[in-house]
Amino acid sequence: MKDLFTNSLNGYILLSSLLFCIGVLGVLIRKNIIILFMSIELMLNAVNLLLAAFSVHHNNPDGQVFVFFIMAVAAAEITVGLAILVMIYRNTGSVSIDALKKLKW
Amino acid sequence: MSKLKENFNDKKMTAVIILSCLGIVSMLADIFSYKKALWYIVLAGVAGAIVANLNEKSNAIIYDMLLTDNYAIWFSTLILALVLLWFMVSKDQYESGVYNSSDNYALILFATVGALILTSFSDLTMMFLGIEILSIPLFILAGSNKKDVSSNEASLKYFLAGAFASGILLFGITFIYGSTGTFKLDKIADWANAAGSNLPALFYTGILLVMVGLAFKVSAAPFHFWTPDVYQGSPMFVTAFMATIVKGAAFAGFFRLFYTSFTSASGSWALILSILIAATILTGNIIAVYQSSVKRMLAYSSIAQAGYILLTVLLSNQEAKYALLLYIASYGVSTITAFTVLYHVEKIKGTDTFESFTSLSQTHPLLSVVMTIAMLSLAGIPPTIGFFAKFYLFSSVLKSNTSYLWLIMVSVAGSLVSVYYYFRVIIAMYGQHEPIISSEKKQIPAFYNVLLLLLVCVIIILGMMPDVLMSIDNL
Amino acid sequence: MEQIIFIILSLAAIISALVVIFSNNPVYSVLSLVITFFSIAGHFVLLNAQFLAIVNVIVYAGAIMVLFLFVIMLLNLNKSSEPSAPLIMKVASSVAGGLLFITLLGALRQSEASAGLSGGNIGSVESLGRTLFTNFLFPFEVSSVLFLSAMIGAVMLGKKNLKDS
């Protein structure tokens, strides 16, 4: 386990897991919708980094091509997310999850 | 282009091409002003896609990404049939002027493309893209009633849950890729078989994360918390689409992945999945009892039904495929019927509470009969198809593995609880007699009467002779 | 040498990621997210995946983050008006996040050789382009459906109904 803090595979697994968990934590504790979106981006970036590391480890470009698809999907997803956010802001004048209590959560 | 033509002549993935083109046609309807004819065009297109899909060359490998085996063909056909049904019953909502039918139809058609991919993928890349193509249009459709704050809220909650689940799913896919070095389902299976019992922890963690991600998508407890709000806030027929087609496709994908790739590692996930199933069945059924809105009750009932359907993933054998097909067909038809009736009742009475069904049998005898049959089918009472689907599912679980007896007992107990809340609707319709306000006597269009009768016939006839679906060879 | 760069980049990524989720002002969050993306791009360079590094900077730091900044600016959200979550909720979430992290750590393989990863030629534009347009041609085409629906959706939600105006 000495190799945890080097640029070995284990080091990348540790780093990506940490970034991923920070993203998950952000989704769980924050209430500002914009920051929730950013936390989700953080999760996806952790995935990208790990995929690239595995791709190098297996010496197989498929993993890096998958990263492209994740980037493409993330861009499309966040566009839709921000459109939803703007729509909500128009109707409620707030971007906090607490402003949305019409339905029982 | 030539490759596309070649594929078309070769009868490969024609349905996907037809639906994509149909989506573009529908998108342009506003500009070229053929919006009045759009409904007919879409209906014809989807019907064409069904025919094309049945003629699909079987066991074709498409770019090493899709595999059109019998499973893919039959589940695609089922999904397309449900979409066709959906377009028929939802006509009224999209003619009311609140929604722009051309945009909405385009999004529905694109989402259907994603659903078709989810039934036939043979590579994790396609599974991921299929899920995303299915979800992204639905985030928007959930919020398509722009002025309504609860629709906005549903849209946001669906988006957050969906994006979060995608992240977890992707992390799982990454771990699986990291341990196997491939995204192909059959190669993953080969790798797992070769490794035998000596599978690395990386692989197990990957399976677990994929399972959690997919459990979010199919709304299994404890990852179901978004479902009731999203189902309640979305426009009625968008909810119907989510509850039937999206759920059916997600289950088809879930089963395909676990059946093809992870059966040899089933020791690691079977226990966790069975706990998930028990939790889902209990949560869904028990919370459904306390609801006052029928729409929200149907949302919880869909959570409970997800628990039953997950039993097929737990089984992961040949028989489970038939059980899955039968169950999705039965659940899909019954749910669409229930939502159609609920739509009309809400339109007449203005709310969707249980009270709005009071003495419906006097003003609208047909609607009450139809709703009764749909509720009986969802509860699993003969002679409807719901009974046979549940019976076949439970018996095939017991036949293959008696150690799941406890799970079947939980399921049966859940079904008994569910009888209570389904019958609440029936009792409200037939039980009380209250003075009728004349405004509530408004009848629904004749087109819907015919359609609803047709749906009831399907539910009952399939219930009488489910062999139609069981006679497919080699699913 | 590579290990020192790895550690510096990792620390930069983790610290700026923590700033993203704990900062009160959304603008600071966006800016530190940009730093995270740049350090992840640095990691890609370290892995000899130069093309991904460039795309990461252009797509994430360039396009997506600018979109975020635009929304923050248009809606004038730079004030921190967010009610903070109850303490018990925060503790519960942190415990959940920590548990997830421990689970993920369990996935580390112990027996792996500890040599540093430095890819051969697979991260080059040539190799990636070849793979993308041969083995992954079909997903590439299918993702156009995804973009089309995201486009329709963003326009549909963004525009005002014609009847209102």
Image (cartoon, coloured by chain):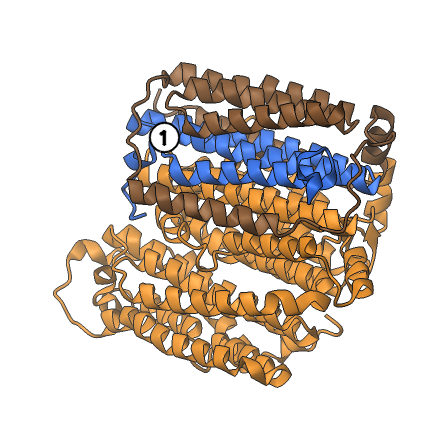
Chain colours: A blue, B orange, C brown
With respect to residue B269, does C160 lie above or below? above
Is residue C45 rendered to the left or right of residue B24?
Answer: right
Q: Residue at x 80, y 34 (%)?
A: C132
In which quarter of the view is residue B255 placed? bottom right
Please, which residue is most extreme toward the left here?
B435
Three-letter residue code for mark 1: Ile
Residue B34, visible in the rendered structure: no
With respect to residue B173, does A18 lie above or below? above
Q: In the image, residue C39 lies at what x, y percent? A: 63, 23
Q: Which residue is mark 1?
A: A88
- The N terminus of chain B lies in which quarter of the figure? top right
Q: Tag 1, which chain?
A: A
Please, which residue is most extreme toward the front here?
A2
Q: Residue at x 83, y 56 (%)?
A: B60
Q: In the image, residue A90 lies at what x, y percent? A: 34, 25
Determine the secondary structure under disc 1. Answer: helix
Q: In the image, residue B24 lies at what x, y percent? A: 63, 35
With respect to residue B454, does C58 lie above or below? above
Residue sitting nearer the eye, B325 or A16: A16
Q: Residue at x 38, y 61 (%)?
A: B300
